Amino acid sequence: MGTDEQQVDGRSVRWEAHKRERRAAIIRAAIEATEEHPPGTDIHVQLIAKKAGIGRPVVYRHFVDRDDLDRAVQRRALDMLTEQIIGAVAAGGGLRDVIERAVLQYVQWAHDHRALHRFAMRELPGKIDNPVRNVIRGISEQFKPLLLEGATVLGIELDEDDAATVDLVAFGVVSQIVSAVRLWLARGEDRKPGPEALAYRLSQIIWYQLDGMASTRGARLDPNLPVADLTTLLAATQN
């Protein structure tokens, strides 16, 4: 590669890095602006641009339109939430404790970031690339192999319909928790119960559903079953 080509290539790399940094800065500014206002406030692009230290036209050099920007903000907000939940699961422990910890992380995050949570859970125009549905679907798909392996550990023989329904069940469980938290937040600043009490009761609902499905198939879930055992077995079956 000649010197001129190397210079052009180097400028292209720096320009792409600059665009990524500018795009990330705009998303951060949008998140900050959202959290500085009451839930449901319409945050204008001009405010986002000012907070990012750029002009309004520059925003639309990095995003096709407002919907494109909103989707990017949703994805980042949901990434922040997912990181909290994954951290709670990764800490390990018994199955029921992990469920309670993961639900508490979600409820507490939604409580602490009420405006951002409301924005993240909005249904944006169009049916393609809906961040909320993508995240719920992604979480349910991650749970599917764990549920299947859990059935194996318990000695439960799943029929064809059971196996084909596992991801749908996981999707339904996650969706109902999200719906319950949205309704809870809509009660306003004087809402009850508190985050910890709500998380405990929602985790009970999840546990009773899983335990109920196991018991109808002749097994009982051990609340102290280490999640690490499931993930170890899962990794072994995938290798």
Image: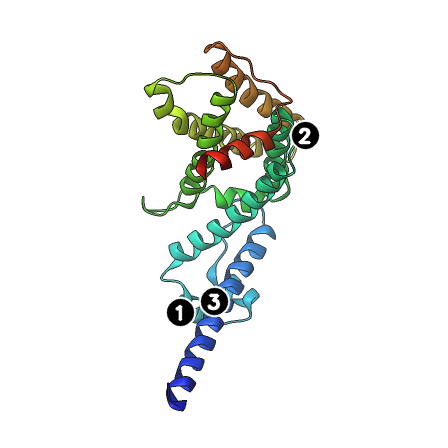
Q: Is residue 97 above or below residue 40?
A: above
The answer to whether residue 64 is seen in the rendering is yes
The residue tagged 2 is: 196
Q: Is label 3 in a helix, a strand or a loop?
A: helix
Q: Quadrant of the C terminus?
A: top left
Q: Which mark is residue 168?
A: none
Q: Circle 1 sits on which residue? A: 61
Say what secondary structure mark 1 lies in: helix
Q: Nearer the viewer, residue 177 or 211?
A: 211
Q: Which residue is mark 3?
A: 20
Q: Within the image, what quadrant is residue 227 found in?
A: top right
Q: Residues within 10 Å of mark 1 (few under 14, many from 20)?
A: few
* Residue closest to the eye, 41 or 1: 1
* Mark found first going from the N terminus, 3 or 1: 3
**Which kind of residue does numbered mark 2 sit on?**
Glu
- Quadrant where the N terminus sits is bottom left
Q: Residues within 10 Å of mark 3 (few under 14, many from 20)?
A: few
Q: Residue at x 43, y 36 (%)?
A: 141
Q: Residues within 10 Å of mark 2 (few under 14, many from 20)?
A: some
* Tag in front: 3 or 2: 3
From this view, report whether residue 221 is shown above or below residue 39. above
The answer for how far apart the CA atoms under marks 3 and 2 are is 38 Å
Mark before the other along the chain sequence, 3 or 2: 3
Quadrant of residue 11 within the rendered picture: bottom left
